Image: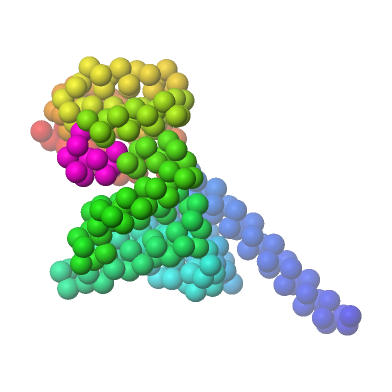
């Protein structure tokens, strides 16, 4: 191997290592919900690969810049067309754009959201997040856009084959859509039996019970969740949100939201911007 070839190879490997290190730094910032800082690191990478574009898209999504998120994720999908997660995130961006688009472009974005969710599931049939996104689409979208109960039921069956507790939760969503609260509650309780230490299962049940006006039972589930994970940030947010929706314990809700805003959260938790909006809603009432 000639000296020039060795030099070029060394430079290439060095650049690749630097890009990988930058991506890891950006990912760590993303995990800490420092989305703008993560974007700065990613934008500075001279030769961006699918991972860089994918993470850029997720960051743009988290800060509400859905057009830029779409553009970045399209590049990620083009570079790695068989990546289920990139397809899922691109579906999410089109979903959000459909929610905020003009009447002339709603159908286009909604159709693309469904197509990318279905593609994500086809690429990885065990991608629970993509399956849940697809379920929500089927339940909420009208038939002419590809929604429908039969498709939702088939998706629930697929979820159940992967995770029984998640499948019970998914079935409860269908029951709620059908206005069958008794059956929905039974499935939520079964999900909790299958995963008794998962705080999310207790929060799902507490939300449901509060919507039914069964506040004492909801409080019992919040207390159980707090006993399992007293520092869980999502518990603070969900409890405050439930209080606000039922117009009770508003002073407690303020305190919970302030604690949430000072907590360390992850991208899986509700954004702090949502907590600020809830706090402003209480303080302005």
Which of the 4 image quarters holds residue 52? bottom right
Which of the image's four quarters has the N terminus?
bottom right
Which of the 4 image quarters holds residue 273? top left
Which of the image's four quarters has the C terminus?
top left
Q: In this view, does 179 lie above or below 192?
A: below
Q: Is residue 37 above or below residue 197?
A: below
Residue 129 position within the rendered picture, expressed as x and y whole percent measured from the top left: 43, 50
Residue 89 position within the rendered picture, expressed as x and y whole percent measured from the top left: 42, 59
Residue extending furthest toward the left: 285
Q: Is residue 130 above or below residue 280?
A: below
Nearest the viewer among 150 and 130 is: 150
Looking at the image, which residue is at 60% across and 53% down? 24
* Residue 212 in sight here: yes
| Residue 258 forms part of the magenta stretch | no
Q: Give the range drawn in magenta.
A: 172-181
Looking at the image, which residue is at 17% across and 40% down? 179
Residue 204 position within the rendered picture, expressed as x and y whole percent measured from the top left: 32, 32
């Amino acid at each position: 191997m000639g000296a020039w070839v060795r030099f070029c190879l060394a430079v290439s490997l060095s650049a690749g290592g630097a890009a990988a290190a930058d991506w890891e730094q950006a990912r760590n910032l993303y995990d800490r919900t420092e989305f703008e800082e993560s974007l700065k690191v990613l934008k500075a990478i001279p030769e961006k690969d699918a991972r860089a574009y994918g993470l850029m898209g997720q960051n743009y999504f988290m800060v509400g810049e859905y057009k830029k998120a779409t553009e970045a994720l399209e590049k990620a999908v083009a570079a790695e067309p068989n990546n289920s997660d990139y397809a899922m995130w691109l579906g999410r961006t089109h979903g959000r754009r459909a929610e905020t688009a003009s009447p002339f472009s709603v159908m286009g974005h909604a159709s693309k959201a469904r197509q990318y969710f279905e593609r994500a599931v086809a690429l990885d049939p065990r991608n629970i997040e993509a399956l849940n996104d697809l379920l929500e689409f089927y339940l909420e979208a009208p038939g002419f856009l590809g929604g429908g109960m039969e498709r939702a039921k088939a998706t629930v069956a697929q979820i159940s084959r992967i995770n029984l507790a998640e499948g019970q939760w998914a079935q409860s969503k269908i029951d709620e859509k059908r206005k069958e609260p008794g059956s929905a509650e039974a499935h939520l309780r079964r999900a909790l039996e299958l995963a008794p230490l998962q705080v999310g299962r207790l929060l799902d049940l507490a939300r449901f019970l509060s919507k039914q006006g069964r506040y004492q039972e909801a409080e019992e589930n919040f207390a159980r969740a707090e006993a399992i994970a007293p520092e869980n940030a999502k518990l603070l947010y969900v409890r405050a949100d439930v209080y606000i929706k039922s117009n009770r314990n508003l002073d407690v809700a303020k305190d919970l939201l302030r604690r949430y805003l000072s907590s360390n959260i992850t991208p899986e938790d509700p954004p702090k911007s949502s907590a600020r909006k809830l706090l402003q809603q209480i303080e302005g009432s």
